[in-house]
Image: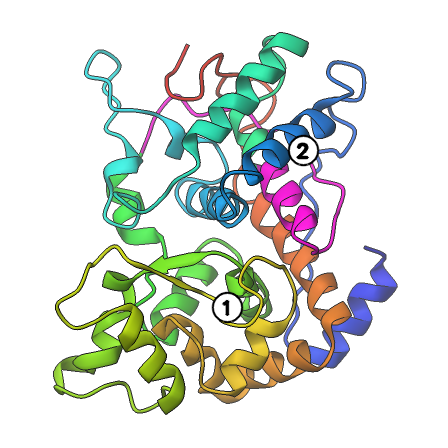
Amino acid sequence: MSPYILAVICILLSTCSFYETNAQLSANFYSTTCPNVSSIVQNVIQQALQSDARIGASLIRLHFHDCFVNGCDASLLLDNNATTNIVSEKDAAPNTNSTRGFDVVDNIKTALETSCPGVVSCADILALAAESSVSQAGGPSWNVLLGRRDSRTANQAGANTSIPSPTEGLTNITAKFTAVGLNITDLVALSGAHTFGRAQCRVFSARLYNFNGTGNPDPSLNTTYLANLRQICPQNGSATALANLDPTTSDGFDNNYYANLQNNQGLLQSDQELFSSGTTLSIVNTFSSNQNTFFQSFVQSMINMGNISPLTGTNGEIHSDCKRIN
C-alpha cells in the first residue's frame, strides 16, 4: 500500500500509527529459492476448500494465535515432545479443541518440501496461508512479507495469557494488542476477519442465557438474532455446535461484519464491544460504509501483525516438519 493511501486511511480514522516494515522481511524472499511458493500454498488451500468451507477462517486464526505468542514463529504448530521439552501451545486454553487446520498446514509443508526442500519456514507458511484464505474468499490480496524462521521452543503459558479471548472486554483486548505493538485501528481491522468462519456455542452461550451472571441474555443482542442463536445453541444443547460469525455472508470476506455490529448482531462479546465506545465505534462505522477502506486497513494490519518479533537471519531454524523441531 502506498504511503498516500495509508495516510488517507489514517485521516479518515484519526487513530492510525505508522509501522516500519521489518527490514529483514521481504516480499521477494523466496524469488530464487522457491519462486512458486505462493501458488503452491494457494493450490493446497483451494483443494481443502472443496471439502471444508471453514478452512480459510481457521488458517488465518492460526496465524493470529501464533503471532500473539512470542511473535510470528510457528511455535503454535509444535506438538508436545518430552525429549525436546516442548509443551505445546495447542493445549493452551485459547487453542485446545478450538484451533484447527493443522493438517492443511502439513499438506502445504509437504508440497513445499517436494518442490523446494528445506527452504520455506512454517511461520511463512502461516502468513501465506492467511493471505490466500482471505483472497480466495473474495477479500483483498497483498504481497506477503517473508523471511521468518521457525522457533525451537513453545510457550503454552504465554498462549494462555497473551491471546485475546472472545469473552473479554474491550479494555483488556486493547491492552493485549498494545502489548505486541498493534493499535486500535489494527484491533478493529483484524477483528473484521470474523466476516467468515464459525464459532462454537460454548464460546458465546453465556450471552444468550446468563450474561455476566445475571440470569438474562446480553441486553445488547438484537432480539431476533438472539432467538435465532438460541435455536442453534439451546440451553442444554451441544457446546460444540457451530454458528456463523457473520449471519449474512458466512463464507465470504467482505465488510458485512461491521454492519452486523451496527445492528447488534455481533456473535462474540469481543465483537459487539467494538460498537460500544467512541473510538472503535467510529472505525466500525467507517469500515461499514466503505469496504475498500476496510480492505486497505485490513491489509496494512495483517502486515503489521506479521511483523511481530519474527525470527530472522540465523535465529531459529527451518522446520522440515511443522510439528517438531529438527
Of residues 75 and 57, the one drawn nearer to the viewer in this rendering: 57
Which label number is shown at residue 82? none
Residue in view at x 39 percent, y 43 percent: 69
Q: Secondary structure at mark 1?
A: loop
Q: Residues within 10 Å of mark 2 (few under 14, many from 20)?
A: some
Give residue 133's position: percent from left, percent from top.
61, 45
Locate residue 97: give its quadrant: top left
Q: Is residue 234 left or right of residue 113?
A: left
Tell me, yes or no, whether the highlighted magenta stretch contains residue 128: yes
Q: Quadrant of the C terminus?
A: top left
* Rendered image coloring scheme: rainbow
Q: Quadrant of the N terminus?
A: bottom right
Magenta region: which residues? 127-154
Give residue 142's position: percent from left, percent from top.
75, 47
Q: Which residue is mark 2?
A: 42
Locate residue 265: give its quadrant: bottom left
Dominant secondary structure, magenta: loop
Q: Is residue 167 left or right of residue 32?
A: left
Q: Is residue 169 left or right of residue 40?
A: left
Residue 116: tell me if it is visible.
no
Q: Is residue 238 left or right of residue 275?
A: left
Residue in view at x 37 percent, y 59 percent: 199
Spatial CA distance of label 1 from label 2 is 24 Å
Residue 76: tell me if it is visible.
yes
Residue in view at x 12 percent, y 68 percent: 236
Q: Amino acid at mark 1?
A: Asp
Q: Residues within 10 Å of mark 1 (few under 14, many from 20)?
A: many
Q: Which residue is mark 1?
A: 246
Query: Does 311 sit above or below residue 135?
Result: above
Circles 1 and 2 in contact, beta carbons < 8 Å: no
